[in-house]
Image (cartoon, rainbow, N blue to C red):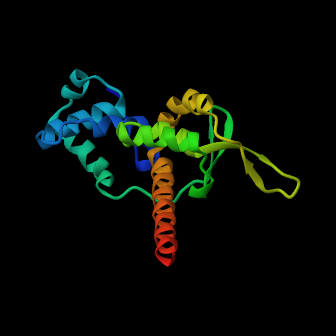
Amino acid sequence: MNITLPDDWSEITLGQWQEMKTLPQDPTELERTLEVVSIILDKSDDEIGSLSEAEMNGIKRHLSWMNEPMPADPQFDITVCDTNLSLMTSVGDIESGAWADLERCVSDGAEENLHKILSILYRRYTVDQYGDKVLKLYESGEAKSRASQFKKLPIAVVNGASVFFLMAGFHSARLSLRSSSLD
């Protein structure tokens, strides 16, 4: 079997990461390795199970980078389905319909719905006469129609955006708490 293994997080997609997160929490190390390799290589359990112990040990050594943290640097501009998108950078600019959809996605399971969450947070944009980006208003149907495409993005891109937005949300919440305590 010809095997090409990923060398870092930039070669693992959001869809693969989501699939790995559904694996049982307490399998043996060998079972977990077989499942992860099956997902990464998109090969059946039988194909992966036919690898020799030496081949599996080599694969485990090669994939040891997966024990390292994912990059957390956000990519503010990405391309999905030949559409240029930009990450919302202000929690305060999120429209009520987008908040409702975000809350639904999070309550239904943030990790399983991360592709949907990102399709809400990344927006199409235009460039104004000053060269500044102007994000398009939220359109639920548009976000839903491209959500599955986010599963094809590298998890390194997705993680950076998630970390950025989480930190922006914490900052916004701190400011709200501070201003409400001044009243």
At x 64%, y 43%, the residue is 123
At x 15%, y 36%, the residue is 31
Q: 149 or 167: which is nearer to us?
A: 167
Q: 81 or 5: which is nearer to us?
A: 81
x and y, in percent, of residue 154 in the image? 48, 43
At x 73%, y 44%, the residue is 125
Q: 168 or 9: which is nearer to us?
A: 168
Q: Residue furthest bottom?
A: 182
Q: Is residue 13 visible?
A: no
Count of numbered tags = 0
Q: Residue furthest front?
A: 183
Q: 72 or 7: which is nearer to us?
A: 72
Q: Is residue 65 visible?
A: yes
Q: Is residue 121 left or right of residue 156?
A: right
x and y, in percent, of residue 8 in the image? 41, 50
x and y, in percent, of residue 41 in the image? 35, 32
Q: Is residue 98 left or right of residue 107?
A: right
At x 29%, y 40%, the residue is 21
- Quarter location, residue 24: top left
Q: Residue furthest right?
A: 129
Q: Is residue 50 left or right of residue 125?
A: left
